[in-house]
Amino acid sequence: MVQAIRVHETGGPEVMKLEQIDLPPPGPGEVRIRNEAIGVNFIDIYYRSGLYPAPTPFTPGNEGAGVVLAVGEGVKGLKKGDRVAYVSTFGSYATERNAPAKDVVPLPKGISFDKAAALMLKGLTCEYLLFRSFPVKSGSVILVHAAAGGVGQILTQWANALGCVVIGTVGSADKAKIARKNGCHHVINYREENFVERVKEITKGAKCDVVYDGVGKDTFLASLDCLKPLGYLINFGSASGPVDGFNVGILSQKGSLYVQRPTLFAYTSDRKTFEKMAKRLFKAVEDGDFKIPLSTKWALADAVKAHEALAGRATTGSMVLKP
């Protein structure tokens, strides 16, 4: 028997219950992992709330880090006792889990379990944002919404290390300090300033090459006005709600703009691509391109409180659950 958070019906944080469940041995192509740390992300809220459909009951969570306890038939490259990290299907909010081996990578000794669990989903998201959705280069002018958040802090540090001009938006003076500390050359408090007008001032009217937007509904349309002609808006999250009823004709009116709505799993579903992304991510950590913004640790039993804090935007950086 293992302990796991279970969701039997979608809704508010209170629908998550800590239960004892039976976990079968790993099947063909699977590994059994003892979780040492579990990542908490907005996508967990989307599934728990029903914004993203999921069959119930389920155990939330898509990332974690720990030790391999057993391997199933046909698994190569992983063995009992290996330190690993993963981004996978549901099931990480548990003391132990089975995961497809294709979703698991060896964890370098220099990266702790806690930092790895805080890193995988957010760090790999930053990897595809900076190198795949819109490959930045030295001198690229970028706007990052929610710059003090978990993805934002990694994204701004890494982009800075790559030579980008980094503009970040935040919602408070305290978060502005965090954004500056983590690579933003310019910080805009959207509660006090019009971020479109400030972007125009900062760039002297040239505006941005790309906007990275994990907020969604509240920032989407205004973000288009921050882009230069042929610029890219990458909407990779919906913290304020999904973008509905968008008229694509607006893109031509505002300068033949590009809009993407990528997902991490579209990239990591190819094992070779996943390995390359993880290798680049771990190297960036080891090279000091960015520090992992681990801010809060919660007990697995306190998953409800963790979701309440995250949904209320009362956190900065990344959170992990400890089994």
Image: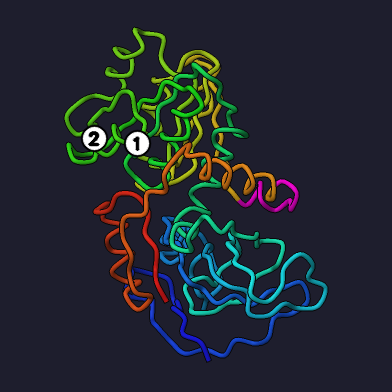
Which residue is pictured at 33% across the width and 18% down the height?
A: 199
Q: Is residue 69 depicted above or below 165 in this figure?
A: below
Where residue 45 sits: x, y (%)? 41, 61
Q: Nearer the viewer, residue 163 or 235?
A: 163
Q: Nearer the viewer, residue 218 or 149?
A: 149
Three-letter amino acid code at the position of disc 1: Asn
Q: Is residue 312 depicted above or below 1 in this figure?
A: above
Which residue is pictured at 45% across the width and 19% down the height?
A: 141
Residue 208, picture quadrant:
top left
- Residue 271 colored magenta? yes
Residue 74, picture quadrant:
bottom right
Q: Tag 1's secondary structure?
A: loop
The residue indicated by pointer 2 is: 176
The residue indicated by pointer 1 is: 182
In terms of secondary structure, what is the magenta stretch mainly?
A: helix
Three-letter amino acid code at the position of disc 2: Ala
Inter-mark Cα distance, 1 to 2: 10 Å
Q: Say whether disc 1 or disc 2 marks the residue closer to the N-terminus.
A: 2
Question: Bounds of the magenta span?
Answer: 265-273
Disc number for residue 15: none
- Quadrant position of the C terminus in the picture: bottom left
